């Protein structure tokens, strides 16, 4: 009988499921729904909401698809892992009914409340204890609900992160994780527990916060109700959960100090692991508990996040031709322009406030356009270079924190499918780039294998992980890419001064 593991990856664009054969370490079936991006509601400027029940419907569809495609028989599935979009807020009542749409990661309505808490608690407390400002994270979003929707707050029994909600729908149990509490800014890094001081300051009842379990552990089992809805066997253990960035790092076997992972989907990230609780004095990059953290063997993930990355590229594709234009064609168009796009600069911050900009709503800007010189090749190249420049801006903050950034790992997906993007990333940051055949859903499946005891070690969990390509920087390109970055940063600073 086969030993199979199911990984679920809940993003803001789609839900992906992957079935992993534990013996070979290879994915045997995968599917993402919907074909087009999931809708994000924005009732007011700066708001971003999704219906958690929509997520659950797509979980059911993707799960049913991969089970059927792989011909899964009773007893073959040994564990389920869940990865999810970070920093969201789901509120449910005592009957586990959703009380309002989920406030998701790119929603910026609560920035001022996070800043207010930061000032009240004091920088001297927040940075060493929380390693972050409350800023625009889950705790601040919950405070917004308390202040602005008291009728909702009065009914809250538990609050959850998006992955906790999916686990609840599968098992009927409401739990969270230590890494999840840290991403919501509920975790005190000094006491290695829930921050009661923050809860008191923000007037958040402690009993609203679910019990935390280790990322790798048995965290409930598929209920009879969920089994009927999904086609899963009743009793299959949920054995792993993590936010998308810690999980992406895990999926690339980034678990030791000095290792780094990067993504460039709707948002773009660099995530580096360290064994010391490092923090940026301005909280522009953020430190969270990593999936393999323990009190005896601490492990932290420093996250650089840029909201406006792949979303800029997809916006540009729609503008230039939509379904008539492929991303490969766009990449070829952009590659015909010179490095630096002849002075055309794209500032990509058009998807909510940016943490590396200290939660300022900078917006997206095309700067330096010359109608007699620039064409679509310059615009495409400027967009991709602008995304890399934004990541480089954060990269340099991480270096200033004392992180050693030399080799970065990424899945061969999203923006990293673009040769233009990859070359720009490698040379602007002067790093080696390793590309792997994996994704968040596969990572969640491997995590479930560890949590359920199917794999005897981390090394065994990553058999079957394929390195596709390694890109090394060429010193001859350092100068032109540095000039392009300096031009980008100059334009950014001009905008920030206005």
Image (cartoon, rainbow, N blue to C red):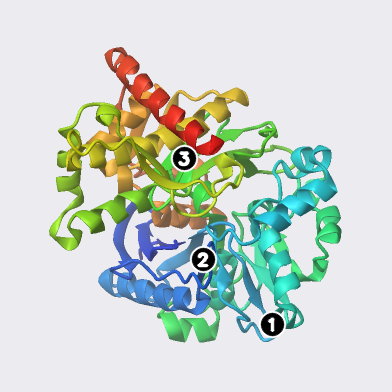
Residue 391 vertical position relative to residue 106 in the rendered view, above or below: above
Crowd band around label 2 with a 10 angstrom C-alpha radius: few (<14), some (14–19), many (20+): many
Horizontally, residue 100 falls left or right of residue 194, namely left
Secondary structure beneath dot 1 equals: loop
Q: Nearer the viewer, residue 1 or 212?
A: 212
Could you tell me how many numbered marks the image carries? 3
Question: Could you give the CA–CA distance between mark 2 and mark 3, rounded to whole angstroms?
Answer: 32 Å
Q: Give the residue number, with chain letter if any, for mark 3.
A: 253
Q: Give the residue number, with chain letter if any, for mark 2.
A: 48
Q: Give the residue number, with chain letter if any, for mark 1.
A: 93
Name the residue furthest top.
476
Mark 3 or mark 1, whichever is nearer to me: 1
The residue at 84%/50% (across/down) is 120
Q: Position of residue 422 (x, y in %)?
A: 30, 34
Q: Is residue 88 visible?
A: yes
Question: Could you give the CA–CA distance between mark 1 and mark 2, rounded to whole angstroms?
Answer: 22 Å
The residue at 22%/37% (across/down) is 378
Q: Position of residue 84 (x, y in %)?
A: 50, 60
Q: Which of 454 and 390 is in front in this view?
A: 390
**Considering only order in the chain, which callout, 1 or 3, is on the residue closer to the N terminus?**
1
């Amino acid at each position: 009988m086969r030993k199979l593991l199911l990984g679920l990856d809940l993003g803001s664009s789609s839900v992906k499921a992957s079935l992993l054969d534990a013996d070979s370490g290879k994915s045997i079936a995968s599917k993402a729904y919907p074909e087009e991006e999931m809708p994000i509601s924005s009732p007011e400027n700066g708001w971003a909401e999704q219906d958690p029940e929509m997520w659950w419907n797509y979980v059911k569809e993707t799960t049913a698809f991969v089970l059927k495609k792989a011909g899964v028989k009773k007893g073959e599935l040994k564990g389920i892992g869940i990865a999810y979009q970070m920093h969201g807020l789901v509120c449910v009542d005592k009957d586990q009914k959703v009380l309002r749409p989920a406030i998701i990661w790119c929603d910026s309505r609560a920035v001022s409340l996070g800043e207010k808490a930061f000032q009240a608690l004091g920088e001297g407390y927040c940075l060493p204890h929380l390693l972050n400002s409350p800023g625009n994270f889950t705790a601040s979003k919950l405070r917004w609900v308390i202040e602005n929707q008291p009728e909702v707050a009065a009914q809250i029994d538990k609050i959850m992160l998006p992955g906790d909600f999916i686990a609840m729908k599968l098992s009927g149990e409401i739990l969270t994780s230590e890494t999840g509490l840290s991403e919501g800014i509920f975790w005190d890094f000094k006491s290695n527990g829930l921050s009661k001081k923050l809860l008191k300051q923000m007037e958040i009842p402690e009993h609203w916060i679910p019990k935390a379990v280790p990322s790798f552990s048995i965290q409930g089992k598929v209920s009879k109700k969920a089994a009927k809805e999904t086609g899963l066997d009743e009793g299959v253990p949920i054995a792993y959960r993590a936010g998308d960035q810690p999980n992406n790092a895990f999926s690339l076997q980034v678990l030791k100090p000095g290792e780094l992972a990067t993504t460039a989907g709707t948002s773009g990230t660099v995530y580096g692991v360290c064994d010391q609780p490092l923090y940026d004095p301005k909280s522009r990059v953020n430190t969270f508990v990593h999936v393999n953290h323990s009190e005896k063997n601490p492990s932290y993930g420093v996250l650089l996040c840029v909201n406006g990355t792949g979303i800029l590229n997809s916006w540009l594709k729609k503008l230039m031709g939509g379904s008539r234009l492929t991303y490969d064609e766009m990449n070829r168009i952009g590659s015909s322009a010179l490095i630096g796009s002849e002075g055309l600069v794209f500032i990509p911050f058009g998807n909510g406030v940016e943490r590396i900009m200290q939660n300022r709503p900078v917006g997206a800007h095309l700067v330096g356009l010359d109608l007699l010189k620039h064409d679509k090749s310059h615009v495409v190249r400027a967009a991709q270079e602008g995304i890399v420049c934004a990541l480089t801006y954060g990269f340099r903050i991480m270096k200033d924190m004392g992180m050693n950034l030399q080799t970065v790992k990424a899945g061969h997906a999203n923006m990293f499918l673009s040769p233009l993007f990859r070359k720009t990333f490698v040379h602007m940051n002067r790093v080696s780039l390793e590309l792997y055949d994996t994704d968040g859903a596969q990572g969640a499946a491997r995590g479930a294998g560890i949590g359920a005891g199917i794999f005897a070690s981390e090394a065994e969990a990553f058999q079957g992980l394929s390195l596709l390509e390694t890109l090394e920087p060429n010193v001859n390109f350092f100068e032109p890419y540095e000039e392009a970055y300096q031009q980008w940063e100059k334009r950014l600073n001009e905008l920030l001064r206005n």
